[in-house]
Image: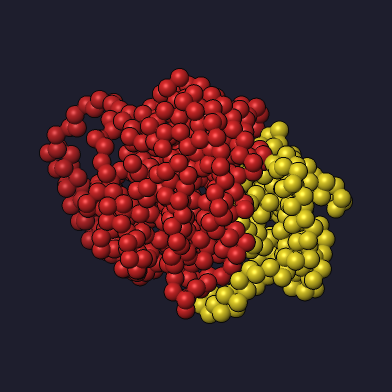
Chain colours: A red, B yellow
Amino acid sequence: MGISMKKFIIRAALLSVATCTRLFAAAPLPAEHLTVTTMPPDSPHRIYVLDEAFYNEIDARVNVFDGDTYRRLGQIDVGFTPGVNLSPDGKTTVVGTTYFSRGSRGTRTDIVEFTDNSTLKTTHEIVLPPKRAMTLPTYFNLAYSADSHFLYVSYITPAASFGVLDPAKNTVIDEIDTAGCVLVIPSGPNRVSSICESGKLLTVTLDAQGHEASRAFSDTFFDPDRDPIFAQGVPMTDGYAFLSFLGDVHEVDFSGAQPVFHKPWPLVGTADKGRWRPGGYQVGAIHRHLNKLYVPMHQGGEGSHKDGGTEIWVFDMSTHQRVARWPLAQQKVATVLAVQVSQDDKPLLFAATDHSDLAVFDALTGQLRHVEKQLGQTPWLILNP
Amino acid sequence: MRSIDQLFEKSSRALAQRTSRRSLLAALGQVLTGAALIPLLPVDRSARAAEPAKPAKPATDDPKSCDYWKYCAVDGFLCSCCGGSSNSCPPGTAPSPITWIGTCHNPSDDRDYIVSYNDCCGKVSCGNCECNRNEREKPMYRPSRNNDLNWCMANADSNYHCSVSVILGVAEK
C-alpha cells in the first residue's frame, strides 16, 4: 500500500504552496473586544427548561432556549431539588431551592431567588425556614398569586404546610398548616389549594395581609387507590386539568371561591384502557386558544406512570376527541418525559426526552423542526409565559 | 440491621409528625392491614396481563441490578453500586430516619415482602446504577407511598446520595 516517494514529494510541495498562498493572501483577524451578550427581546417561543441534574443533584439549572433560532440563550442556577416558576407577567423566574454551606454538606439554607429574565441576573432573595418541599418539580412547588402580590411555597418536613411570602417586601408572612395536603395551586389573588391523599382539595383563602381567613375541603374528585391523578397539573384558561394514571382528564375550574370539578373524560378508549397510558413528569400541555391538549402516551401497565411517551396524542378539549397521534420513534425522537406548547398562533410543541434531548415540533402539524441534543442531564420541566 | 420494631417505630413517628391523630390511626391501619391486603389490592393486574407489547423485565437476584426483586419501587441510585448494599448505606453517609413502605414480590420463594425504602444521605447523588421502578408507587399527596420526595429531608445533612430497600417482613396472603 502507499504511494511512491516521488508522488509524496509532489503532493507535499503542492500543499506547502497552497498553505503559504493562503497565509500571505488572508488579512489578519481584527482585535476582539470581550463583551457580555445581552438577552434578545422576549418571544412566545422562549422556554425555560429545568434540568434537575439528577446525577449531581446540588447543581440543577434552568436552560433558557429559543424555539425559533434553536439557541441556548443562557442559564439560571437553581441549586438542589428546586421548585421553579415564572411570574404571571413572565418577567421573573422564581426559584425555591436549597444550598448547603459546604457545597454538598453543611448547614442547610432554604431560599427563594428571583431572576430578571431580561438579564438573567439574580436580583434578590428571601430566606425560608428549612422546610421547603424537596421533590420533583411541578407548577405547584412554588407559585405566585394571580396579581403577584403573594408568593406561595410548598413545605414538606414531612409535615405539610405552605409559606406565604411577600415578594415586594422580601418577607415571609406566614406558614399555614394544610392537614397533610400538599403543594400550592394558586387561584385568584388570595386562594391556595392543596391536593389531599383522600382525593380532595383543601382550599385556603387568605386575608389582605396574607394570613388564613378561611378553609374548606372539596368533595372527593378522584380515587387515589384505583386511579390516582398526576400531581402535575396542566394549565387551562380557568384552572388546571389533572390527568389520571389510566388516562382520565379531570378538569378543575379554579376561577371561583371554591374549585369546581367537571365530569372526567377519557384519553383512552375502552379497548385500550390500561394498555395506553399518559406518563412522564410533565404529562400534558394545553394550547389555551386552540383548546388542544398534548399528552405523551406509552403502552404499559401498573407502575409505568413515569415511563416516557412513545407517541404524542393530541385532543380537542371541546369535543374530547383525539385529533392526532404522532409516533416518535420514526422521527428518531426518544421517549418524551415533559411537554410544553407555546401559546401563540404559530405554536411550537416542546418535548424533553429521556435521552436529555429537546425536540421542537410544529404544534399544528406535528412536523419535527429540530432536536437539541443534551439540553442538560435530566430535563423534567418546561416553562413558558 | 435494625429490628422490625425499630423501623416501624420510626415510620410511626414520621407519620405522627405529618398527620392528625385520626389520620395517624388510619395510616397505621393502612400499613398494618396492608401487610395482608396489598397483594389483593386492585392494582390493575388484568391490564398488565393483557399487555402484549412490553413483557415485564425478569426479576433477578443481583442487588446491583435495577431488576432485583426488592427494588420494585426504587427511584434513585442503588446503594449497592455506591459502596453500600441493598440494605446498608455507603461509608460516610447516614440513613434517613423517615421513609416509606411498599410491597415487593420475590419470585424465588413466591412471597410478597414488606420493604422499607430508605435514602442514604449527606453526600451528593451517587450517580451509579440509576433505577426507576414504581410498582404501586403513588404521587406525593400520598407520601407514605411516594418515591419522589427526598427522604433525606429531615436529616442533619439532607443531601440525597442513594437508596436501599430493607425487608421488614413477609406480607402474608
How many numbered tags mark residues here? 0
* Quarter of the view holding residue A249: bottom left
Q: Position of residue B5 (x, y in %)?
A: 87, 50
> Where B5 falls versus B156 (above or below)?
below
Q: Position of residue A316 (x, y in %)?
A: 32, 63
Residue at 28% of width from left, 33% of height from top?
A39
Q: Nearer the viewer, residue B10 or B19?
A: B19
Image quarter (top left, top right, bottom left or bottom right) of the N terminus of chain A: bottom left
Horizontally, residue A286 falls left or right of residue A32, namely: right
Q: Residue furthest left?
A: A25
Residue at 31% of width from left, 52% of height from top?
A288
Q: Nearer the viewer, residue A156 or B155?
A: A156
Residue at 82% of width from left, 64% of height from top?
B170
> Where A175 falls versus B84 (above or below)?
above
Q: Position of residue A236 (x, y in %)?
A: 37, 50
Horizontally, residue A133 falls left or right of residue B38, namely: left
* Quarter of the view holding residue B98: top right
> Where A112 falls versus B112 (above or below)?
above
Q: Is residue A5 visible?
A: no
Image quarter (top left, top right, bottom left or bottom right) of the C terminus of chain A: top left
* Quarter of the view holding residue A263: bottom left
> Where A144 falls versus B96 (above or below)?
above
Q: Position of residue A151 (x, y in %)?
A: 47, 31
Q: Is residue B71 visible?
A: yes
Residue at 65% of width from left, 59% of height from top?
B73
